[in-house]
Amino acid sequence: MSPRRAWAVLVALSLAAFAFITTELLPVGLLTHIAPDLDRSRSQVGLLVSGYAIVVVLASVPLARLTQRIPRRQLLGVTMLLFAAANALAALASTYAVLAGSRVVTALAQALFWSIATATVTGPFPAAVRGRVVALFATGATLAPVLGVPLGTWLGQQAGWRTAFGALAGVGLAIAVAVFILLPSYPPAAGGAARGTAPDGRRFVLLLVATALGIGGFMTLQTYVTPFLLDVTGFADSVLAPLLFVSGAAGVVGTLAAARTLDSRPTASLLAPLSIGAASLFGLYALGALRPGVVALLAGVGLAYAAFGSAVQSRMLQLAPGSTDMASAGVSTAFNAGIAGGSLLGGGLLPTLGPRPLALAGGLLTLAAFALLAVDARRSRAVGSASASTLGSPATAREITPARTGTALHD
């Protein structure tokens, strides 16, 4: 694949990520329009989002396994056609059951997309810059809450909520056409990023656990950030949208900043967002009533969340013990498990403790993820130093020297 074509594929799949995340979150923005139109409660419409995440958790690994031999162009193209058809069905839904069914289909398409997109988009690029490519690819997903959901909400308010889903169907169809035109057809195993560059099963499992803990920590508060800002900080309802935009814009900054370090310092790229996120969450718990401080700390949470997501995807490409498609499916499962777990934890604590302790609980989970990865990094450095010392010892040198005799000049 030529560099120009590779960049075109990167843009197309980043737009696909933008479309998927916008679709996932759009019912939140259109909740007050969908509920009365389909004669359902707001909580029932809210289930369209949480149920979506559960489907992604359950389907990611099985779908990746079932489709691991299908060429990427055909698989991604059909996935985007399925996305378009499901959103068209949502636009035409006359009942809640039909809308819920369309959401299940879209969630299945998203589960498959995230299992194969990262390896597909990074494969044509040299391994030394794949972290940067991952960050640029993730920009689409990061922009979705900042631009996609507000635009979809505005369109739904002006022309009806069905129009917003219809527009997403059109976007999905255009991306499917682009995928069929731009992406070469090749067996998945032939892709440049089909296998991890430094496979390590133990460290990969730790990465999955840390991902679930870290994302769970962020989402414990993020899911219920509105009552926190209203009840704890005392902001007016009219400033919620600008505050959430600040958090989303900080996420874009975090993703772009992570692009500079993902390749050269992969471990630090994981630890830095977790430390910023934990400090910001603890700060929100301690300073929740201080408005200027809350704005800055909210931006810190948004920055850390997005940067951590990019770092996890990049690290997966290195540590994957087998197929990166299966590894990516595992990361997607851990990520969505964190989303669902954090939301459930926050929902359980909110009625009895109120919104403020959610920041503390989220900070503790994020700190646990940081500690897990920090201890693992220290252990790996210690093992590496011990191995280097063994190789450099006189006894080892005497063992190695005879084997190299007569070949030194050629080496």
Image (tube, helix red, strand yellow):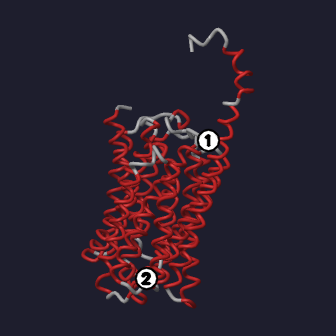
Farthest front residue in view: 394
When asked about the image quadrant of residue 154, the answer is bottom left
Residue at image coords 39%, 84%: 229
Q: In this view of the protein, which residue sits in the foreground, 23 or 90?
A: 23
Q: In which quarter of the image is the N terminus?
A: top left
Q: Are marks 1 and 2 in contact (CB under 8 Å)?
A: no
Q: Name the residue under label 2.
A: 287
Which image quarter holds the C terminus? Answer: top right
**First-in-chain label (1 vs 2):** 1
Q: Where, by quadrant of the figure, is residue 25 drawn?
A: bottom left
- Residue 95 lies, with reference to residue 188, above or below; the image says below
State the mark number for residue 199: 1
**Residue beneath the point at 43% across and 79% down:** 225
Foreground pick, 363 / 332? 363
The answer to whether 227 appears left or right of 378 in the picture is left
397 vs 189: above or below: above
**x, y (%) of residue 32?**
37, 83
Q: Distance between the residues labelled 1 and 2?
A: 42 Å
Q: Residue at x 58, y 40 (%)?
A: 198
Q: Can residue 98 be seen in this view?
A: no
- x%, y% of residue 216? 55, 69
What amino acid type should be assigned to the residue bearing mark 1? Pro
Q: Nearer the viewer, mark 1 or mark 2?
A: 2
Where disc 2 sits, the SS reads loop
Q: Position of residue 368 (x, y in %)?
A: 60, 66
Nearer to me, 13 or 86: 13
Residue 267 numbered tag: none
Q: How many marks?
A: 2
